[in-house]
Image (cartoon, grey):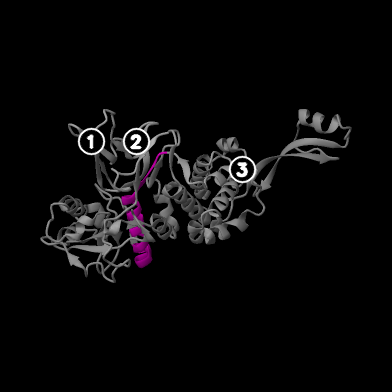
Amino acid sequence: MSKLIRSNHLGTVSEHKQIDFAYEEVEVSDIFFQDNEKNERCVQVVYGRESLSLKMSYFIGADWLVKNQQAIYVAPKINKGLQEIDYLGMLQSCLTHGDIAKNTKDLYHIKLNEPFIEIDQQMDLLTPLLIMQFLQTLKILVKKGLKQSYYKVERNLNSRIKGKVLIAQNIKKNIVRNRVTNTFCSYEEFGFDSIENRVLKHTLSFVRRYLSQYPEYLGSMKCLIDYCTPAFERVSDEVNLHELKAVKRNSFYKEYQEALKLSKIILKRFGYHISEIDNSSVEQISVPPFWIDMSKLFELYVLGLLKDKYGDRILFQAKGSYGYPDYLLIDDMQPLIIDAKYRPTYQQDKNLSYIIDDIKQISGYARDMGILDKLGYHTVEEQSSKVVSCVVIYTDQNEGDKLPNCLTAGKSIEGFTKFYKVPISVPVLKNKIAE
């Protein structure tokens, strides 16, 4: 049985924290997001003479420090009282905007081919997130309408032949039983009962079964299940996953690609057997190593808040000449360049050393001709004479959860022209405090 590091005998490991423990002559390496050394570290290992330190970044999840021997679990916590962040609430909030779902590609990383890690059931951050994203994607798909297509069926027809006669099955089911008027045939039909729709319905059955055991999640997702279920009444949930390989993409139904990808992950999570869900109600469960990028989740959460307030006037990661700012507010009176930072360091007013690199980056966006053109400054004269206001939206649990009426009415960042910061609190789980 592997050991699971939750702390240095002090409590659960929180994101963006550090733990220290005695060096046991076991080689431990840094863990990178998506196993790509070009990406940010989820866990950084710092060796001392007789000890080592693990520095957490803004990622939550579970992974192997030493494969099959030592695992680590990082929980979603914030500083104030170590309250636990309601990461599902954040995801649900932003996914109410259908166009945000397509930006969740780099939100998490799952290592399905790695050995699974045994954790406490309440530590399973992965499954609820996958289910939430699947249901929100499925809702968009259902709202657009399930696609109809040609699909193969095999049936024992009476007094007629259609398509291709399946000789072996016909002999077994009809000739040896003296059913001379029957013929076992394979042919195509056009309708909703395609392999794609059957996989989605099959996954929906898994999701419904899982949520029935966890009422804390069911409450927030029941409306999604009730919305999606009637659309699959004419669809069977008998499915052969190998048939999915032959499915061709359809650009008009692009939501299917994301929904089917999530289906495969959810089904593999439970070993493709719905009975495994009943076993998931035990205190200990096994999950694949995974990481969730909380900075990315906060970025999407803020995007949802901005779209609630400004609608289509918000552009997300618009391409400039040299960069991609988080958000642009297209406004004739006061266009803005907006950046989201999942860092409590912005709560400080005096020490700018922690944020100066951010200010340099955002200032660069305000001088990017491609960005200025998108903001409505098209001529060289306009681009040379205008100083675009920049806003940083950051986390602060002492503040409210609503954006102010005017983003530039808040605190200005000292020493810089037209630079403002706006605090926002993120949802937390009620009555759930870290030990």
Identify the amino acid type marked 1: Leu
Mark found first going from the N terminus, 3 or 1: 1
Q: Which mark is residue 35?
A: 2
Q: Can you identify the residue that label 3 sits on?
A: 195
Start-end of magenta stretch: 289-313
Q: Earlier in the sequence, mark 2 or mark 3?
A: 2
Residue type marked 3: Ile
Name the residue at the left extreme: 415
Residue at 15% x, 52% y: name it.
356
Whole-percent x and y of residue 121? 46, 47
Q: Residue furthest bottom?
A: 405
The residue lying toward the viewer, choosing from 101 and 379, is: 101
Residue 256 position within the rendered picture, expressed as x and y whole percent measured from the top left: 52, 47
Spatial separation of the CA atoms under disc 2 and disc 3: 32 Å
Query: Circle 1 is placed at which residue position?
Result: 52
Residue 361 covered by magenta stretch = no
Q: CA distance from mark 1 to mark 2?
A: 22 Å
Position of residue 46 measured from the top left corner of the image (x, y, whole percent): 21, 36
Left or right relative to 360: residue 256? right
* 97 and 297: which is toward the camera: 297
Q: Is residue 305 magenta?
A: yes
Quick check: can you spot residue 201? yes
Q: Secondary structure at mark 2?
A: helix
Q: Is residue 382 above or below residue 159?
A: below
Above or below 259: residue 396 = below
Please, what is the dominant secondary structure of the magenta stretch? Answer: helix
| SS category of the residue bearing label 3 | helix
Q: Is residue 429 above or below residue 276?
A: below
Q: How many marks?
A: 3
